[in-house]
Amino acid sequence: MDHPLRETRNQALRQRVVRFLRDSYSVLGGGNIVFVCGGNGSHHMRTKFRDYCNNNHNDIIIFFPEFAMHDYFSGSMYNFLNLADFEKMIADLSHAIVLFPEAAGSYAEVGYFAGVKQIAKKTILVLDSKFQGSDSFISMGPARKIDKISMYAGNIQICYDNPDFSCVISRIKRNKFSLNRRKILFSTYNDISNFERMCIIHKCCEILSVATFDDIVFVLKGVFSARISTENVKQLMSILVGSGFIRRVGSYGHYCAVEGRKGFLFPREGFVEKESSLKLEIASICDDTEGEFYRLIDGVANAS
């Protein structure tokens, strides 16, 4: 089911949406996504840290990569996913990376993250104090390397049996969340950052109410004169799902923005009311549809 904005009769409105996306927004200098690595069980530090943040620090958005990967592989359009490159992208979009070495995958990540400077510089390594009395491969090798490179150095030790995560929160917030805004300088898709692309994709989902991957690509091709990377768009949409900014709805591969989860793209002065008006016009053409698409829109509205 294509979005009604793609219909020929809505061409004028579609052109206004494209112009509005290009001219009307400013973007924050960075986000508040924290990429957390560790074990998957309820007893693991990664799970406990997520729950602690959700209950006590709602200014931090916890990201688990497997949720993004599940969405990525759930679609009909994907290529081979290079996990190393995908984790570099996630690191690029994250304010910080918190790594608890507590399971096989996270042990491997300690070594990999230490060897990739762009990941290591954002890494907060949180070690179990119980095992720090003697030398180990991690403490003598990758932990030292991360400590030298990371903007969050030094490495943290906590008791995994009775964790106090307040020191991890303090370390994350050592580097302040950006409050500065700037206008996106549109040129080509490749010339803007992954963060800016992600913010634009999220805004597309918000403005369209519901949209498939193909709908988002269709709008982005208008914004960037048809020159975009569909693979990059798919990966960024999966990261938006994994960090709770958008969610899947219905049975036809549609997405919608999650109510209450604000993005990082804001209408510039003088454009707030115009954005509201544009959303109302799009809602109006959606209300004029029939069948499955109308029921989908109605279901999203009632769930909000």
Image (spheres, helix red, strand yellow):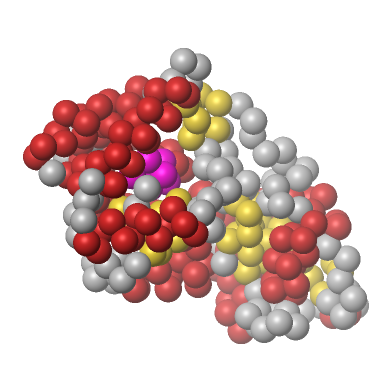
In the rendered image, the vertical position of residue 113 relative to residue 41, given as above or below: above
Q: Residue 102's x, y, as percent?
A: 70, 79
Identify the residue shown where x is 63% and y is 59%: 62
Side of 231 relative to 147 (left or right): left
Q: Residue 106's x, y, as percent?
A: 62, 75
Q: Magenta stretch mostly in which secondary structure?
A: helix
Identify the residue shown where x is 57% and y is 49%: 261
Res 299 visible: yes
Q: Residue 178's x, y, as percent?
A: 64, 34
Identify the residue shown where x is 37% and y is 35%: 279
Side of 37 relative to 78 (left or right): right
In which quadrant is the N terminus drawn? bottom left
Based on the displayed image, in which of its 4 quarters is residue 104 positioned?
A: bottom right
Identify the residue shown where x is 44% and y is 53%: 301
**Tally of marks:** 0
Whether 88 is among the magenta residues is no
Between residues 113 and 252, which one lies in front from this camera angle?
252
Based on the displayed image, in which of its 4 quarters is residue 53 positioned?
A: bottom right
Q: Residue furthest left?
A: 8
Q: Residue 157's x, y, as percent?
A: 85, 67
**Range of residues picked out in magenta:** 202-208
Res 129 visible: no
Between residues 124 and 237, which one lies in front from this camera angle?
237
Q: Residue furthest top?
A: 270
Based on the displayed image, in which of its 4 quarters is residue 64 positioned?
A: bottom right
In the rendered image, the vertical position of residue 104 relative to residue 23, given as above or below: below
